[in-house]
Image: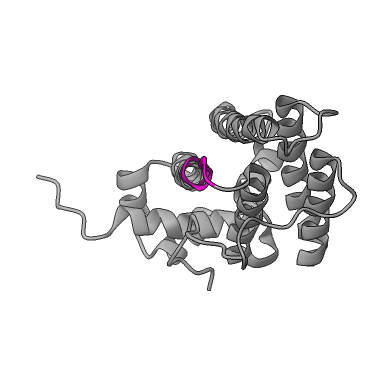
Amino acid sequence: MARPRTFDEEAILDRAILLFWRKGYEATAMSDLVEDLGLGRSSIYAAFGDKHQLFVRALTRYLDRQDALLATALDADGPALGQLRDLLGRLLATDEVCGPAGCFSVNSIAELLPHDGEVARLAQRSLSLAEQAFTRQLERAAHDGELSTAITPHSGARLLLTLIQGVQIIRKADPDPARAAACLDSAFALLTGKATPLEPAGTAFDVGPRPLDGVHAG
């Protein structure tokens, strides 16, 4: 009879996220996993499979949390573009948990695609959900007269999705938050057709719930 597990699988996955996030997939050895997760090799294999299977589960958990934030952060109350600007700021803020390591999902795409089919499917699904959420919000903005008539909701959504991915890469070389904020301000000035940056919807910046609340890189 197999012995019952004496560890919290979700907590272990959170620790695996941070390890893969800091080191990348290829640079993470099984010995690193044993040390950081506090489990023996046999326990890791029994609970999560091999290194790649554990990585896929960790990335899935990370992306599910980002998808949940997208699903709950946008609603029909308040200025549509202001809400969207706040959300993008919150998404960027979630990645500060791992310092200069950048974004876990963007790093995974850069490292493993196009050769890793499982990671490709996860990334494509997450990017598609984000594009759909951005498009819906920009459709509301267009209906309310906030969006410039020079850009369609769909093309605006793709612009924002591409921008946020690019900003995540640039932040690994230059983590100055002012650069990321200026990029977002420029994008939203383009979306509104106004020269002045769009003010966030809230009176104060609040990152709100993070995909890794309670988990620290140290």
Q: Position of residue 149 (x, y in %)?
A: 81, 28
For this rendering, which residue is in front, 115 or 126?
A: 126
Q: Position of residue 206 (x, y in %)?
A: 57, 65
Q: Residue at x 47, y 47 (%)?
A: 65
Colouring mode (rainbow / by chain / secondary structure / one colour): one colour
Q: Position of residue 14 (x, y in %)?
A: 43, 57
Instruction: Give the quadrant of residue 115.
Output: top right
Q: Position of residue 152 (x, y in %)?
A: 76, 26
Looking at the image, the residue that sits furthest to the front is 145
Looking at the image, the residue that sits furthest to the right is 195
Horizontal side, residue 6 vs residue 98: left or right? left
Magenta region includes residue 70 = yes
Q: Residue at x 85, y 50 (%)?
A: 186
Q: Main secondary structure of the magenta part?
A: helix
Q: Please indicate, yes or no, whether residue 22 appears anywhere in the rendered image.
A: no
Q: Which residues are magenta?
A: 68-77
For this rendering, which residue is in front, 55 or 212?
A: 212
Q: Residue at x 82, y 55 (%)?
A: 197
Q: Please indicate, yes or no, whether residue 153 appears anywhere in the rendered image.
A: yes
Horizontal side, residue 67 vs residue 103: left or right? left
Count all numbered tags in the image, as a single digit.
0
For this rendering, which residue is in front, 89 or 168?
A: 89
Q: Residue at x 57, y 48 (%)?
A: 78
